[in-house]
Image (tube, coloured by chain):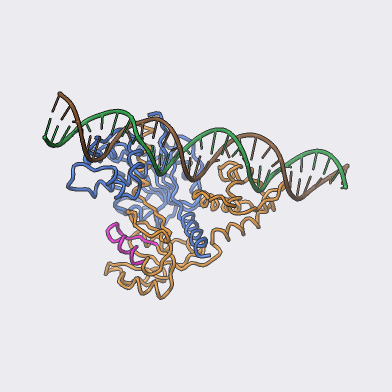
Chain colours: A orange, B blue, C brown, D green
Amino acid sequence: MLNKIPQAAVPRLSLYYRALLESRGKDYISSEELSKLTNFTAAQVRRDLTYFGQFGTPGKGYAIEGLKKAIVSILGTDKNWDVALVGVGNLGTALLSYRGFEQQGFRVVCAFDSDLRKIGKTLEGIKVQDTTELEAAVKAKNVQIAIVATSAEGAQKVVDILIGSGVKAILNFAPIRPHVPPSVNLLNIDLSIELERLAYFLTKSSG
Amino acid sequence: MLNKIPQAAVPRLSLYYRALLESRGKDYISSEELSKLTNFTAAQVRRDLTYFGQFGTPGKGYAIEGLKKAIVSILGTDKNWDVALVGVGNLGTALLSYRGFEQQGFRVVCAFDSDLRKIGKTLEGIKVQDTTELEAAVKAKNVQIAIVATSAEGAQKVVDILIGSGVKAILNFAPIRPHVPPSVNLLNIDLSIELERLAYFLTKSSG
DNA sequence: CGCCCACTGTTAAACATTTCACAAATAGCA
DNA sequence: TGCTATTTGTGAAATGTTTAACAGTGGGCG
């Protein structure tokens, strides 16, 4: 397997997993069936799966339980990850109460804000700390993942501190593209840009 | 201009625009300078811009104000868009109070939920209506854009109603991939999948 | 006006991803 | 065991995107 894995194959793997969850009551599923459930082509399903290994049985298809276990192990969602949350505004608070985190093995273990009115409050069982304590706390707890939900202004500084504290992956909601070294995994969720994409599509199709 | 525009070029256009906002005090900017501000290559900057037209002056670069106006017009963020919000849970509420919407010409004009405890409440000046009123309200106000922030369970049904009511673009936060006809623009922001991508990157790099 | 310089716009090449088509492999059955 | 029906896994082709290289264009200046 010298082939490099296309970035886009990883989220598709997640979608295959979801489709498998809906396929109760059967032992095997074919790439054809998986393609119908996910709206990808059968060829792509097979190709994608072979990027990560060989999971199928010719003539039968993929053993559903085995494939589910394989995907969970590839994605790493069978492990537990401690997460630091920086920025407890509207979005940060919503993320704190998002139930999906724990289902995927993510546990928010500390939260930070620079707003004095928020520091000291307890949300979802987590006490909000001053951002000045960020580095010490992240190092002490050996946190590897951080979620940045601050304003654009503070975000790069927060990211720098996080990286200096040993964080290896960042999910960034602030509307900037922070600079990070290649060793750090950065994923941007940028609402402004998604809105502009929508506006573009609408403008194009409706004049 | 027979070339088709790569999907990924549109969000890059948004990022170029952001860089231009930071470039006060100059009249012209070169593709080289833009590339440094955005971390793309200069060739890509030029290529991307020509997908949408010819904006530069050889020997000088791009007129900043003119390019800003052009991008705004291409993206359609100079227009005003009325938006319907479905699902006023933690995330929906956070989105309602997100200030970025109005800056980009998006105005949430109605909000819906099926939870009786939320219906009738007023959030950010918007009175939450029962989801049963969705179709009538969207038709009456001729809303073209909807944000879906419901749970996975209700999402497809909500999307069907929205499309039946004339909505042309949907920003979906629910963790499913709704089926929509090709005429409708669907954009998924899927937190679960982003988390799994992060987990994958971490698993790969740290064993 | 004509030359030079800086920079764009574009053609061609490189690279990446997806689709196609089929050989190889397994299960099931006689 | 040998044959057939399925369905995988994968080379090769098609498609799509990015990068590289440079011809052409406009502006500034003598």
Reply above or below: A167 against B78. Answer: below
Reply above or below: A138 against B19. Answer: below
Q: Residue at x 38, y 70 (%)?
A: A165
Q: Residue at x 49, y 56 (%)?
A: B197
Most foreground residue, C14 or A181: C14
Number of numbered discs present? 0
Q: Is residue A158 magenta?
A: yes
Most foreground residue, B196 or B89: B196
Spot occupied by residue B21 in the image (x, y as percentages of width and height): 24, 47
Question: For this view, does B54 lie left or right of residue C4?
Answer: right
Spot occupied by residue B153 in the image (x, y as percentages of width and height): 51, 51
Most foreground residue, B140 or A38: A38
In magenta, the rendered stretch is A147-162
Spot occupied by residue A124 in the image (x, y as percentages of width and height): 41, 68
Q: Is residue B79 visible?
A: no
Q: Is residue A148 magenta?
A: yes
Spot occupied by residue A32 in the image (x, y as percentages of width and height): 64, 43
Question: For this view, does A141 lie left or right of residue A47?
Answer: left
Quadrant for the C terminus of chain A, please. Answer: top left
Most foreground residue, A65 or A167: A167
Magenta span main SS: helix
Reply above or below: B40 against C8. Answer: below
Q: Is residue A187 visible?
A: yes
Quadrant in which residue B79 is drawn: top left
